[in-house]
Image (cartoon, rainbow, N blue to C red):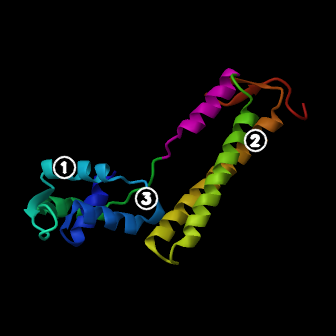
Amino acid sequence: MQQEVVLAMLAKEPSHGYELRARLRDALGPLGEAMNAGQVYVTLTRLERAGLLTAERSADGADRADRKVYALTPDGQQRVAAWIAETTWPKPDLAEFHLKLIAAAAAGLADPLTIVDTQRRELLRRLRDAQRAAMAEPEHSAAALLLEGVVLRLQADLRWLEACERTWTHHRGGTWTDPASGTWAGRRSGS
């Protein structure tokens, strides 16, 4: 779990870990469902040790044990402000699948078209799930926006698979001689 997200949620108001987890789940919608309480509490402990938040015991009433209320320290407030002001974008990292596909094709370990087809089916399933989840969220909510991002990334991955399929269909019968440069040996269409 990204520490800055936890700090940002605490910037609004101090909270118990349980309240914080509920706010995170509300903000993230279905994407927050996978977040377990253990992740939240481990992150809170790390942030407290780093001096970015404080924790004080607070009695919630006769029926509850003492709970810790977490609040940002001045350093925590500065870290959130710096994080929000920072311009970031995902690094163009290669996912494990990208590497697996290229390695299998380059080494001749598997038919890349079979791998592409299997991955496409999985991405289409995930795309349907994400679209259904997005439709269940209130329009213009933060969760709907996050799910739209998931849908768009899945669609981009599907387009990349189509490009892979075109390349390998075009070069069927050839072998990849230099994976680094992407050159092929064997018969090319039209030659």
Question: In the rendered image, which residue does mark 2 sit on?
Answer: 165
Q: Is residue 157 left or right of residue 92?
A: right
Question: In the rendered image, which residue does mark 3 sit on?
Answer: 33
Q: Residue at x 50, y 70 (%)?
A: 144
Residue 179 visible in this rendered orientation of the protein? no
Q: Which residues are magenta?
A: 92-108
Q: Is residue 50 left or right of residue 136?
A: left
| Residue furthest bottom in the image | 139
Give the residue type at disc 2.
Answer: Glu
Front one among 29 and 167: 29
Q: Earlier in the sequence, mark 2 or mark 1?
A: 1
- Asked which secondary structure carries label 1, the reply is helix
Q: Position of residue 51 (x, y in %)?
A: 12, 52
Give the residue type at disc 3.
Answer: Glu
- Asked which secondary structure carries label 2, the reply is helix
Q: How far is disc 3 from disc 1 in space, using C-alphas?
A: 21 Å
* Residue 98 on the magenta segment: yes
Crowdedness near tag 1: few (<14), some (14–19) or many (≥20) residues, C-alpha within 10 Å: some
